[in-house]
Amino acid sequence: MGSAPASSFPARDRGCPGLVLVERDYFDGPGEELWSASAVDREPDPWWDAPGEDWRDGRPWSAPHEAPGADWPEAGTRGAFEAGGPAELMVPGVPLSRLVEQAVAGELPGMSDDAVVGVAAAARRLRSRAEWLELKATEEFARRRWESDPAPVRDKNGRWRFNGRDAEFAPDELAFQLTESPLAAQDRMDLALALRDRLPAMAGQLAAGRIDGYRCQLVHDVTAGLSAEHARQADARLAPEAPGLRYDGLRRRARKLAMMLDPESERERKERATRKKARVEVFPEKSGNYALAGRELPVEEVLASKAHIRGLAQELRANGVLGSLRELELTCYLDLTQGRDPRDRIPGRSACGDPGGDRARSDSPWPFSPPGAGGPGRRAPFPAKINLLVPVGTLLGWSAMPGEAGRDMIDPRTLRDLVQAASRHPVTRWCVTIVGADQTAAAHGCARGQYPWDPSPGEARADPASSATQLDELAQLLGRLKIGFASIAKGACDHRHREDRYRPGRQLQDLVRARNATCPAPGCGASSYHCDLDHTKAWPDGDTDECNLGPPCRHHHRLKQASGWNLAQPQPGSFTWTTPAGRAYHVGPTRYDA
């Protein structure tokens, strides 16, 4: 490997440090304009000898030979980024990075619109190049962990299979460092090897900054089920087009090619996804609302369901139910998934017997209140156990602090509505966590039995209640719940809650889960209430106690037991994970915002 050439900046700039500051989030925004497809048929060399870049005739590669006579503008970087300017012809590397840094540092306000767009495009090329560098390092890591496995196997979708072997947990090493999920890290490792073996032309475009990593991921996802030969054929045809296609266009183009190359493989890929991945999923939207979706369903089933919902919505509208077709479709969808008949919304057919059930409510986003067990204007009790972290001030109406449900934020008004509904279900259990000055859990307790609760009418008070009133309302609530609080060990363990058995009792479980509200693995947000209770040091050598229990999710519970991994709990609720590579990561008790 040769050494990098000297800086190509003029003498007046040679004193500037070569800063290469690029972010690592590569999956947003549109792509670059259509570039030529030159030199995408081979793996790129390091940046100082990248595709199409040469050091010839004494001219540095940052001033391309394709643009004879081009020179740096006298007015700093302003003219360099205009259409056809030197920066537009530069490949991503240290010189272009320095030029972009110089422009952003103070020259953007004086640039033309054309030049500002050029700076953004140059930064995008740098970001794509940096992502290629990351994937090259990831490729080497995957080679060491996966390809060195005694019996590496790929499934019919082209994914690696290491169930029960140490290589299964290799992605976690990257996930801990990059603060992402193990599945995302596995996808990156898989993509890195695919770019090496199956999509070399796409890799060349990424290295040259002409496409971003998400476009590579799209092509890989579609071609993963193809043979290596067919994948390379698709790669050769897609790579020249990819810089000029948006994400949706590239995905359609890739799917069409995959079907042309191997239609049976494409059909089998979809059927396997339905068999193994079909599910009903709930996830938060950007607005704070939620989505309820059926994923990986057969095409014909989805189209039939959509037609059924549309037909019901049209029937409601034809019979005088208020609302747009979009609103009525959404309402039918919710009715059908909650055991209600959408036709009960037709005036005169309300199951609740309320003639006003179809009229619009001023305080609802829907054109009418939902019929059902909750009655018009009331939410039906939740037929499930829901864990709510509720700041007391929000619950009583004298604070605007948001609450949480399943670690997702909820506005105060919605929170009180949810708590009211949940409190009326017989399996709901009230728990309270007292948070100390350091924002970690200091004590915790749960009430026995059902306690229906109704909030004070109206919105949260505009003027906070006096301290005396707040304390009085809090005392009344806690007195009604009759909760007995137990302190949570901090720093050192006094062993007051130690138990002489393998499975901890309910109180000890609650204390550990209140102390660590999520899985104690780095970056893992799995709620502790759905996680395992695990002895950090195996029982019976390790005690069943606060200082030796944690709530890892099932994946990280298995990870802890894999060869080369080590988990320690030096203080109650503080965990240190050490990876096979020797890197250590520390996670402490949950810090609450209440």
Image (spheres, helix red, strand yellow):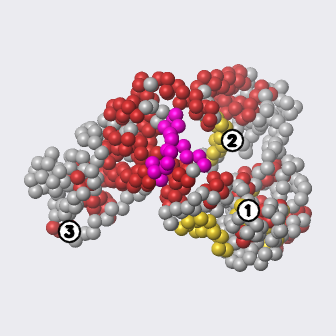
Residue at 57%, 62% in the rendered image: 565
Residue under the point 25% across and 41% down: 39
- Residue 198 figure quarter: top left
Depth check: 306 or 202 in front?
202
Q: Residue at x 83, y 25 (%)?
A: 348
Give the Cα distance between marks 2 and 1.
Answer: 36 Å
Q: Quadrant of residue 137?
A: bottom left
> In the image, what residue type sits under mark 3?
Arg
Q: Which mark is residue 513?
A: 1
The reply to whether the magenta stretch includes residue 460 is no
Q: Is residue 236 left or right of residue 298?
A: left
Image marks 3 and 2: residues in contact by CB distance under 8 Å = no
Q: Quadrant of residue 359?
A: top right
Please give the range of residues in magenta. Answer: 145-164
Q: Secondary structure at mark 1?
A: helix
Image position, residue 90 (x, y; %): 23, 51
> In the image, which disc is placed on residue 158?
none
Residue at which label 3 appears: 14
Residue kind at label 2, given as amino acid type = Pro
> Residue beneath label 2, please?
365
- SS assignment at label 3: loop
Say whether residue 404 is visible.
Answer: no
Magenta highlight: main SS = loop
Residue at image position (51%, 35%) is 157
Q: Is residue 481 left or right of residue 207?
A: right
Q: Earlier in the sequence, mark 2 or mark 1?
A: 2
Point out the tag, 3 or 1, that comes first from the N-terminus: 3
Badge 1 amino acid: Arg
